[in-house]
Image (cartoon, grey):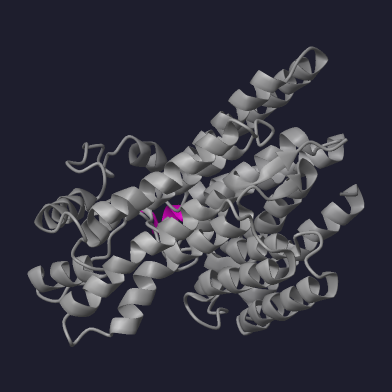
Amino acid sequence: MKERNYILLVLAHVLIGALIYNFPQFSKVYGLSILILGIYFVIKNGNRGNEVLYVSAYLVGSEVFLRMTGGNILYEFSKYGVMAFLFLGMYYSGFSKNAIPFWIYLLLLFPGIIVATETLNLKSDLRTSLAFNISGPACLGVAAIYNYNRKILFSQLNNILLAMGLPIIATTMYLILYTPELKTILTSTGSNLETSGGFGPNQVATLLGIGMFIFFSRLVLESKTKLMFALNLIIIFNISYRGLVTFSRGGMITGLLMILILIFFLYKNTRGEGKYKLNILLVLFLLGFAFTWVYTSNQTGGLIDKRYANQDATGKVKESQFTGREEILDSEIDAFLDSPVFGIGVAKGLEIREEKTGGEIITSHNEVSRTFAEHGTLGIMALLIVFLTPIFLYLDNKQNIYMFCFLVFWLLTINHAAMRIAAPAFVYSLSLLKVYMDE
C-alpha cells in the first residue's frame, strides 16, 4: 500500500472516532455504511480478490466500537454479518472440499442444541439463549470452512489485518476523548468502565490487544520509511496505553504473547543483514514499550503495576487471580461430570447459575469449560478439531508466519472472554489460509 493512502486511511479513522464522540448518532450511520459499502464492494468485484475477508475483518475490528457507541443494528450483528459475507464469498468462490473437519465440528454442536430444547426452563427465551451462546462457535465454523486452505498472498493477509486494525484506531481516538483525567477516577485496580468507553473492559481490551499486534506487524514488516515507522510506533503507543488503562489484563497479555511469537518466527526466518535491521527495530520497539509502561504507571499512580501483580490498591495480594471466575469453572466441570456425553445443553449453565444465585446473571468467561459442560464429550472432540487442524496444515504451509499467533489469540481469548465477540472466531480462521510470499 502506498504511503499516502495509508496515512489518509489512518487519519480518516481518527476523524471517525472524533465524529462519533461529538455526534453519537453518527455511529448508526457508520455501522450501516459498513454493511452497505461492504455488500457493494463484494458484489462489484465478484469476490475475485477475496473481498469478503476484507469486509469481514473490518466488521470484526469495528464490533466493539459499534457496541460501545450504539451503532450496531443488532447486538450480535457483527457475528451474523461475518457469516453472511462469508456465505456470499462461498457463493462466488466456493470452498475447499477438504474442509470436512469443520463440517464435523458444526455437527458436533447440534446435540447440545437439541438437549437444550429439553433442559432449558420454559421461562427462558429459547431462541435468544441459544443464539447468544452458539453464534460464536457457528461463526468460527463458517469462517473456517471458507478459509480452509484458501490460497492468499502474504501482502493480502497483511491488508486483511489492516482492515481489522483501522476501526481499532477509531476506537482508540474515541477512548482518548471519552476518558476523564485518570487520577480523578482511579481508586482501585479493578477493570474500569470509565477508561473503556463506558463498555465492557474485557471486550475493549481484547480488541486493543489484537490492534497492538496488528500495528506491531506493520511496524516490522510494512514500515518502508522513517515516517511510516514513526506513525506505526505512535499508533502502537496509543493503542497499548488505552488497553493498559482499561485494567483488563487478558486482552493485553494475549496481544503481547502474539507479538513475542511473531518475533520468534521472524528471527527464525531472517538471515544476514535482515536480522541486523530486525534487531534495530526490536530495540526501538522495546524502548517504546518500556516508555509506554512507565508513562502508564505514572498516569495511574502505580495502580497498573499493582493490577498486573494481582494486588489491590493498598498493595495486598488478592486471593483470586481470576476475579472469581474459578467458581464458574468449578460449576462447569461439575456439570460436565453430571452429563459427560451430550452435556447439559446450550445455555443451561447460565440458567443453573442464575437459579443458584437467586436471579443473578453470571455468564461464563471460559468457552472451553462452557463447551465441556454444555456439549459434553462431543464438545471436547469439537475443540480438539479446532486446535489441531491448523497445526497439521502448518506442516505444509510454513509461510503463514502468523499461524501460531492467530491460534494463540483464539485459545487465550476464549479462556478469558469466551466468544462474545466475532474476533476469536474470525482471527482463528486466518490460521487456516494457505499463504504464499509475494514474488
Dominant SS in magenta: helix
- Name the residue located 47 percent from the left edge and 77 percent from the top edge: 75
- Name the residue located 30 percent from the left edge and 72 percent from the top edge: 113
Q: Which residue lies furthest to the top in this view?
A: 272
Is residue 366 visible to the viewer in this orientation of the structure? no
| Residue stretch rendered in magenta on the structure | 182-187
Q: Residue 174: where, in percent of width, then height?
A: 61, 65
**Which of 86 and 413 lies nearest the eye of the viewer?**
86
Up the image or down, 135 lies above or below 61; here it is: below
Up the image or down, 191 lies above or below 287; here it is: below
Q: Which residue lies furthest to the front in this view?
A: 97
**Which of 431 and 411 lies nearest the eye of the viewer?**
431
Q: In which quarter of the image is residue 402?
A: top right
Is residue 10 visible to the viewer in this orientation of the structure? yes
- Name the residue located 77 percent from the left edge and 49 percent from the top edge: 156
Q: Residue 222: where, in percent of width, then height?
A: 79, 39
Q: Residue 252: where, in percent of width, then height?
A: 48, 44
